Amino acid sequence: MQSVHYWRRRLAVAAAILALLSAIAVPAAAQSLFGGKQVEVQLTLPDGKPMADAEVRVFAPGNSSRPTVTGRTDSTGKFVFAADRDGFWSAEARRAEEIARVSIRVTGADTSSEPVSPYWLLGLFSVLLVIAVWYRLLRARSRRPRT
């Protein structure tokens, strides 16, 4: 049977990790790891119904032959992608025999999201590695037979 002290340490480590992760958590919709602007497009049919679960291809400005982003629309016909430069982007959605196309003009500075520094990410992963090694050492020490 494991001691109460062992379980208290495990609970303390879990609480510390949870506190660290909640302090540095960033909403996914607010920030793109690679910079750029978050663009949301809602694709509909001519009768106004949303193109739910349609295959989407997004083309960057000046490159209409090769899609930059691919994916699927959600149940309301929405699709979100990151535009890494200004210009006219185009999106094409296909579902069965139906096709919808839209052009999106992306301009201006995006102040809502700055790219995350690679040094910041490296620091975060280093801290998590130190916590993992520390936890393993504590665990190994608690399993050692006492003399």
Image (cartoon, rainbow, N blue to C red):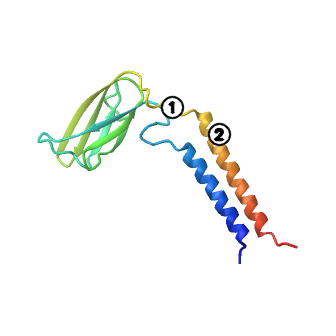
For the view shown, which residue lies furthest in the bottom direction? 1
Labels 1 and 2 touching (C-beta < 8 A): no
**As rendered, which of 122 and 29 lies closer to the eye?**
29
Q: Which residue is mark 2?
A: 123
Q: Which residue is mark 1?
A: 115
Q: In the structure shown, which secondary structural element does the residue marked by tag 1 occupy?
A: loop
Question: Image check: 30 left or right of 8?
Answer: left
Q: Residue at x 73, y 73 (%)?
A: 3
The quarter in which the C terminus is drawn is: bottom right
Question: Image check: 106 left or right of 32?
Answer: left
The quarter in which the N terminus is drawn is: bottom right
Q: Amino acid at mark 1?
A: Pro
Q: Position of residue 73 (x, y in %)?
A: 29, 46
**As rendered, which of 138 and 91 lies closer to the eye?**
138
Q: Amino acid at mark 2?
A: Gly
Q: Earlier in the sequence, mark 1 or mark 2?
A: 1
Q: CA distance from mark 1 to mark 2?
A: 15 Å
